[in-house]
Amino acid sequence: MNSRKLEILVGFFVALGIAAFALLAFKVANAGISGSGETYQLNAKFENIGSLKARAPIKVGGVVVGRVESIFIHPKEFVPVVNMAIDANYLCKFSDTTSISILTSGILGEQYLGINPVIAPESAEQRCMGNEVTVNEQDAGLDELFGVESKALANGDYITDTKSALVLEELIGQFLFNQGSE
C-alpha cells in the first residue's frame, strides 16, 4: 500500500516536470508579440541584410514592438525587402521620416531591427486612421517648416530611411585592403 502511494506521488511529480518543461519551451519559442496579439504590416528595402532572419525582433529603444515576418527579393529592383509585423498599438504612431537599422546584439550576436522613431503629429495620425482632421498650429508649423505634409505609417507602408547591416568580413577586407595600399 505504501509503495502504491509512492509510485503515484513520483508519477505526479514527473507529470508536473513535463508540464513545466513544455511551458518553458513555449515561452522560449515566443510564439507571438506581447500585447493584444494583433499586428499590422510595414516593409523596408535594404541593400544588405547580413544574417537577419525571419522572426528576428524589432525594437524601439530596446523594447520589442514586433517581429520580422518574412524576407524576400523585390522582383524588379533585386534588393532584399523585409516584411515586418508590428504590434497594432503602434498603428499610425510612426512618421514617414522614421528610420530603421539592422543591428547586432553584442559582437557576434543575433541581428535585429532597430527603429529610430519619429512620432507622427496628431493630424497625420488622425488622417492615417481615417478620421476628420483638425489641424492645430503646432502641426501646421511643422508642415510649413519642412514644406511637406506629415504622414503617419499605416498598414503596408514602406519605411524608406534604412541602414543596412554591417558585415564583419567586409569591414576586415576593407581594413586589410587599405593597409596594403599604404
Image (cartoon, rainbow, N blue to C red):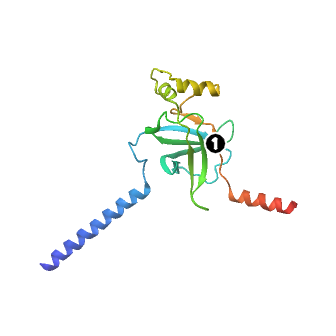
Q: Closer to the camera, 58 or 60?
A: 60
In the image, 169: left or right of 33? right
Give, as a three-letter code, the residue at label 1: Thr
Q: Position of residue 166 (x, y in %)?
A: 67, 53
Q: Residue at x 59, y 26 (%)?
A: 143
Q: Is residue 146 visible?
A: yes
Q: Position of residue 32 (x, y in %)?
A: 43, 48
Q: Residue at x 50, y 33 (%)?
A: 155
Decide: is 178 above or below 5. above
Q: Residue at x 64, y 42 (%)?
A: 162
Q: Closer to the camera, 78 or 169?
A: 169
Q: Closer to the camera, 107 or 23?
A: 107
Q: Quadrant of residue 111?
A: bottom right
User: Total marks drawn?
Assistant: 1
Q: Position of residue 134 (x, y in %)?
A: 47, 21
Q: Position of residue 108 (x, y in %)?
A: 61, 62
Furthest-right residue in this view:
182
Q: Residue at x 46, y 24 (%)?
A: 130
Quadrant of image for the N terminus: bottom left
- For label 1, the crowd category at 10 Å Cα-Cα, with few meaning under 14, some 14 to 19 and many 20 or more, is some
Q: Is residue 39 visible?
A: no
Disc 1 designates what residue? 162
In the image, 172: left or right of 118? right
In the image, 55: left or right of 175? left
* Secondary structure of residue under mark 1: strand
Quadrant of image for the C terminus: bottom right
Decide: is 134 above or below 94. above
